[in-house]
Amino acid sequence: MILPILAYGDPILRKKGKKITKDFPELEEFIDNMFETMYSAFGIGLAAPQLGLSICLFIVDASSFEDDDEISEEERNFLSTFKQVFINPKMLDESGDEWSFNEGCLSIPEIREDVFRKKNIKIEFYDEKFNKHVKEFNGIAARIIQHEYDHINGILFTDKLSVLKKRLIKGKLENISRGKIEVEYRMRFPKTKKKR
Ligand code: NI
């Protein structure tokens, strides 16, 4: 089932997610719904708080990068099969130079900005079967994980922009929270409670 994605301004997006256990009610169904919702909006990552559930869970599917000829073949090959559920993740290390990448967010439609983040990460997480993993990622894969990891900590990519950039997009963000925007996918806007 496609669920509405919460828009910028919703207080749930600012809450820290709670850790979950194997017996979290209807977890499998919720994860299925997350993927369905993410694909319906052509996203590459989605965090549970964006669907109104304040828990430590996000998903990634970066396979759409397989046709991106602006990145190396090696990275493209990796991303083409990079689909993963991350439960109770814990960032163990972030290292390497900061690099900028143009980020967007399904909760913040039509805004894209360059964001600086470190190149390499090491992260511990559980998959949907609650098997534990410790893995290293770099480049775009790390970038997507860092963005989603921020979501479960109540952080949005726009928080990381310069004071000037923040000022420039302030009006647009206000419009998003009021639902004064045309979006091709299902969203819920905090200041209207309008569902589409
Ligand atoms: Ni996002």
Image (tube, rainbow, N blue to C red):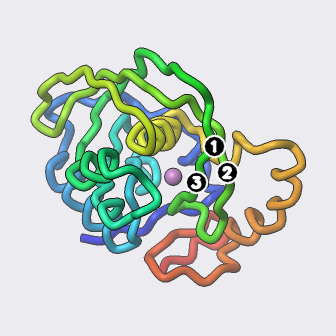
Q: Nearer the viewer, residue 82 or 11?
A: 82
SS of the residue at dot 3? strand
In this figure, which residue is indicated by the disc labeled 2?
114
Q: Nearer the viewer, residue 183 or 76?
A: 76
Q: Could you tell which of marks 2 and 3 lies nearer the N-terminus?
A: 3
Which residue occupies 59% across, 26% down? 97
Task: Note whether ligand 1 is within 8 Å of mark 2.
Answer: no
Characterize the local packing of mark 3: few (<14), some (14-19) or many (20 or more) Cα atoms within 10 angstroms: some
Which residue occupies 51% across, 19% down? 95
Q: Amino acid at mark 2?
A: Asp
Characterize the local packing of mark 1: few (<14), some (14-19) or many (20 or more) Cα atoms within 10 angstroms: some
Label 3 or label 1, whichever lies nearer to me, is 1
Kindly identify which numbered label has been placed on residue 100: 1
Q: Amino acid at mark 3?
A: Glu
Q: Position of residue 156 (x, y in %)?
A: 61, 45
Which residue occupies 20% across, 37% down? 24
Characterize the local packing of mark 2: few (<14), some (14-19) or many (20 or more) Cα atoms within 10 angstroms: some
Disc 2 to disc 1: CB gap under 8 Å: yes
Q: Nearer the viewer, residue 61 or 72?
A: 72
In this figure, which residue is indicated by the disc labeled 3?
103
Q: Is residue 6 left or right of residue 90?
A: right
Quarter of the figure with residue 89: top left
SS of the residue at dot 1? strand
SS of the residue at dot 2? strand
Rendered-image quadrant of the N terminus: bottom left
Disc 2 to disc 3: CB gap under 8 Å: yes
Q: Position of residue 127 (x, y in %)?
A: 18, 35
Asked if residue 194 is positioned above or below residue 164 in the image, the reply reads below
Task: Note whether ligand 1 is within 8 Å of mark 3.
Answer: yes
Which residue occupies 65% across, 45% down? 115
Q: Is residue 84 left or right of residue 15?
A: left
Q: Amino acid at mark 1?
A: Ser
